[in-house]
Image: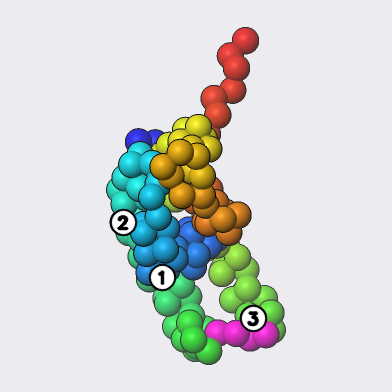
Amino acid sequence: MATKKFTNAAIIGIMRVMNDEEIKTIKDKKLPVKLLYALRRSLPNITEAYKPYEETLNGICDKYGCTTEDCTPEKIAANPELSREITELLNEETEVTVHTVPESVIEQCGEGAYDALSLAELDRLWWLIEEEKEDEE
């Protein structure tokens, strides 16, 4: 387990690519247990971290007389204050506890009894990979 800092924009990105269909496709593959476990343990925490962003975004949109559905990029660009607040919200960092795996676990995919991951699937799982520790001098 690791606590990672994600911007709200990164959390949105994870939520978009980890929709139910994509998760099912990945979970249906024969993959290392550590990887599947990390995904199952971590995705609820990402989903939970998304909720305050969504609530705050709704509040910002209400403040400027729009909803998240009709708050288009054009409408945002036309209102500098709305644009500033949404940009600030997207850049806000949130600490999320995720169950990470070493890159070596990902590298096992496609070898032996494990199914390979496509580049798109690998790209969807970037947030589960352990960060390399910098050498201490």
Q: What residue is shown at x 43% (from left), y 44% (from top)?
A: 114
Task: Please say whether residue 66 is visible from this viewpoint.
Answer: yes
Provide the secondary structure element on which disc 2 rests: helix
Q: Amino acid at mark 3?
A: Pro
Q: Is residue 118 left or right of residue 95?
A: right
63 or 25, nearer to the observer: 25
Circle 1 is placed at which residue position? 21
Residue 65 x %, y %: 49, 88
Circle 2 is placed at which residue position? 44
Pointers 2 and 3 in contact (CB under 8 A)? Answer: no
Residue 122 x %, y %: 55, 51
Provide the secondary structure element on which disc 3 rests: helix
Q: Name the quadrant of the C terminus.
A: top right
- The answer to whether residue 22 is above or below residue 133 is below
- The answer to whether residue 52 is above or below residue 95 is below
Q: What residue is shown at x 60% (from left), y 17% (from top)?
A: 135
Q: Amino acid at mark 2?
A: Pro
- The answer to whether residue 114 is above or below residue 22 is above
User: Viewer-nearest of labels 2 and 3?
Assistant: 2
Q: Magenta segment range?
A: 71-75
Distance from Cα at disc 2 to Cα at disc 3: 29 Å
Q: What residue is shown at x 56% (from left), y 55% (from top)?
A: 118
Distance from Cα at disc 1 to Cα at disc 3: 27 Å
Residue 131 x %, y %: 52, 34
107 or 134, nearer to the observer: 107
